[in-house]
Image (cartoon, rainbow, N blue to C red):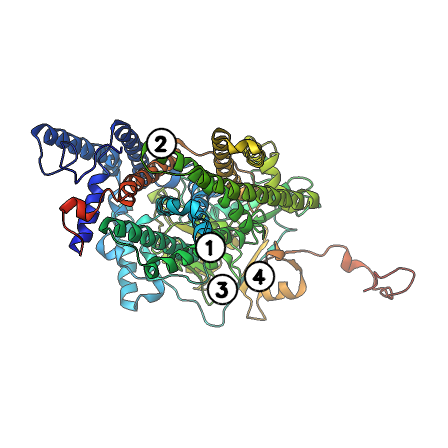
Amino acid sequence: MKRYLTFVWDCVRLSFVGDWRYHLWMTILTVVALLGLYAYCQQLVHGLVTTGMTDQVSWGLYIANFTYLVGLAAAAAMLVIPVYVYRNMHLHDVVVFGELLAVAVITMCLLFVTVDLGRPDRALHLFRRFNFPISMLTWDVIALNGYLLLNLHICGYLLYCAYCGRQPARAFYVPFVFIAIVWAVSIHTVTAFLYVGFGGRPFWNSAIIAPRFLASAFAAGPAFIVLTLQIVRRVTRHRVTDDALFTLRRIMQVAMIINIFLLGCEVFTEFYTDSAHVASARYLYFGLHGRSALVPWIWTAIAFNLLATFLLVLPASRALRTLNTACVLAIVGIWIEKGMGLIVPAFVPTPLGEVVEYFPTWGEIMVCLGIWAFGLLLYTIFVRISVPVLAGELTYEKRYGVQAP
Amino acid sequence: MNETQPGQGGRAGDGGPQLTRRGFLRKGAAAVGGAAAVAAAVSPLRDLPGDDLPTFEKFFQRHYKEMTPAEKEAVLRRVEREVKEREGVEVRVGDPPPLTGVEFVYALNISRCIGCRKCVHACVKENNLSRSPEIQYIRVLKMEKGSIDLETSDHHYDPPVVPEHDSYYMPVQCHQCKKPPCVKACPVEATWQEPDGITVIDYDWCIGCRYCEAACPYWARRFNFAAPEVPAGQLNPDMGYLSNRPRAKGVMEKCTYCLHRTRRGRMPACVEVCPTGSRKFGNVLDPDSEVSYILRQKRVFILKEEVGTVPRFFYYFDERGSRYHEPIAPVEPGTADGEAGT
């Protein structure tokens, strides 16, 4: 127990130590996170009226970001599968980075849901009356928190073992790794079902949403990790091989192609049928009754996704620079598509046919940026700690000169 | 960030045991700066209205369905006290139970409705709906003649006189569905269906996630994006715990068929005010009630039947023409007239 506390204390200390670049980066993130906190406090005082949401468009940027991030969190499993299922050891060293990403991102997800609540002071009501299994939201609460705990356990256990300088016992983490793989699929499926199950929202009421969620998550997640790993190997001594990056590239290739294919299926069904159901899709892609706030966004997303897919399938993306471009395009494209492109149009027109557009306010944007900054802050700290610990540079023995019992 | 490692001899700045004075001052300054920044970030909370912070009593208040009669009584009196303190008005907050053998339904005659919106405003007054920001439970749609496509409806018609030529009007409010998707959606069971068919909300239990609002196919639910404002002089003092008592910022609300009236034998405010008699309300389990007659005799339809929520809100229209035709023999199947003869 004492050794565990020492471990936690060393982690805390370590997160304050670094060169000037590290301190600058952390300071910027802290400032943005605090600005977000400021904006959120404003929202607490005045209510959600500080956001751009209305009774017509009752979910906005918060839920959009939440949806995107659930996908990013599921990406951790994308790293784990090749290693543990297919024994592809290129990725072995980077699995922990993926799972730490999942921890940071799920934390962000939970924050995004919390800031969206009208009465966060009553969040504990979830423990007192839980509408399970009827409400899909309760499924999501279980899925997300369970995934958080699973990943916390796996990463925490591996890091702690490295700190103690002993070999991790497979029985203590391998079963959890396999549960986490299935769970990663479940968090995304359950989040999709959150939207899919309502007859009153034809735009969401489609079986293709869940598979599309998974496909885009399998693309955006590895894209994010490709970029992160390159930063990690540049600023730390941790070695990440190009092979690991190219394995991720292959995952992205397949996922992006499937994602675009499913998009095509969806667009065809909506527009060829051309029934009353198409109203939301028409609003999204072309505008409705002269309102077209989302049109530039979605076409940007489609252009980015197509370009990213094109780059990824070309041999040219074996060059890191091209690969990175494709990754950035995919991350941004999917963020727009999963966020603004999936959540907002379902509310336009309203079930009674009213067309009211949604424009996020600055306060709302600040809260979102604050949560992103906080998430990056967490992830930076995680990486900062795990690199020396996994490399065996920071162990109980080295620290206190005693062999851990 | 790979230069300094703790545990390798405590250099200045890494928090090792040999703390220098300079390092100490620098850290102290950083800590003070950090604390000041956090304090600045949470500074808006100073303006948090006092009644926004839940008291011990409110924080641990139980769900409506779990309260004992004594607890419920205490809560009703507390709400009365709070309104008195805040608005200086004496009000009575009751909690009339659902009546046995009663299932309320609503029938609305769209051939009579002239779109005057008197129902909208009577509802606002009766139910103490926020005037700023404006919340209304009833939305009257002006429909194009010959179409029932909601997307072509006009929500914001504003002519000098109604009705307008070549249009008809379709008021929409909560349909009190028998299979309510909003109740399914709620993660904390803050909204449920009562035995008399009315879907209600415990405003003290709702966490404000707005999932029910996304679920409703009739756009019948409203959210308090800001603290609701009702001028004290216009407050309706006859209040029900599950209906028109004051709501807080950040919770959902909806039409309750005026249950504080209807469970005591009165009509909903919207029915009472309607100048054309388009609105009918009553107990569908009573075969002699007006609504039972309408459901049996009139041409009744429900909005969005395809979403399968089985509403307790019916639209109907008067028969004109068809009944004046002399009876004729239907066309037999397989004759020259084709399959139309049924």
Q: Secondary structure at mark 1?
A: helix
Label 4 to label 1: alpha-carbon separation:
48 Å
Q: Do tags 2 and 4 sit on the same chain?
A: no
Q: Residue at x 37, y 56 (%)?
A: A146
Residue corresponding to mark 4: B310
Whether residue A109 is visible to the viewer of this picture, yes or no, is no
**10 Å neighbourhood of mark 4: few (<14), some, or many (≥20)?**
some
From the viewer's perspective, tell me whether residue A34 is left or right of residue B113.
left
Q: Secondary structure at mark 3?
A: loop
Q: Residue at x 34, y 36 (%)?
A: A373
Q: Do tags 3 and 4 sit on the same chain?
A: yes
Identify whether A130 is placed above or below B136. below
Q: Secondary structure at mark 4?
A: loop
Residue corresponding to mark 2: A234
Q: Do tags 3 and 1 sit on the same chain?
A: no
Q: Earlier in the sequence, mark 2 or mark 1?
A: 1
> Are dots 3 and 4 in contact, CB under 8 Å?
no
Disc sitting over residue A85 in the figure: 1
Q: Which mark is nearer the camera, 3 or 1? A: 1
Q: Which mark is nearer the camera, 3 or 2? A: 2
Q: Secondary structure at mark 2?
A: helix
Residue corresponding to mark 3: B197
Q: Position of residue B231 (x, y in %)?
A: 35, 42
Q: Do tags 3 and 2 sit on the same chain?
A: no
- Between A137 and B297, the one lying in front of the other is A137
Label 2 to label 1: alpha-carbon separation:
29 Å
Q: Amino acid type of disc 2?
A: Arg
- Chain of the residue displaying label 1: A
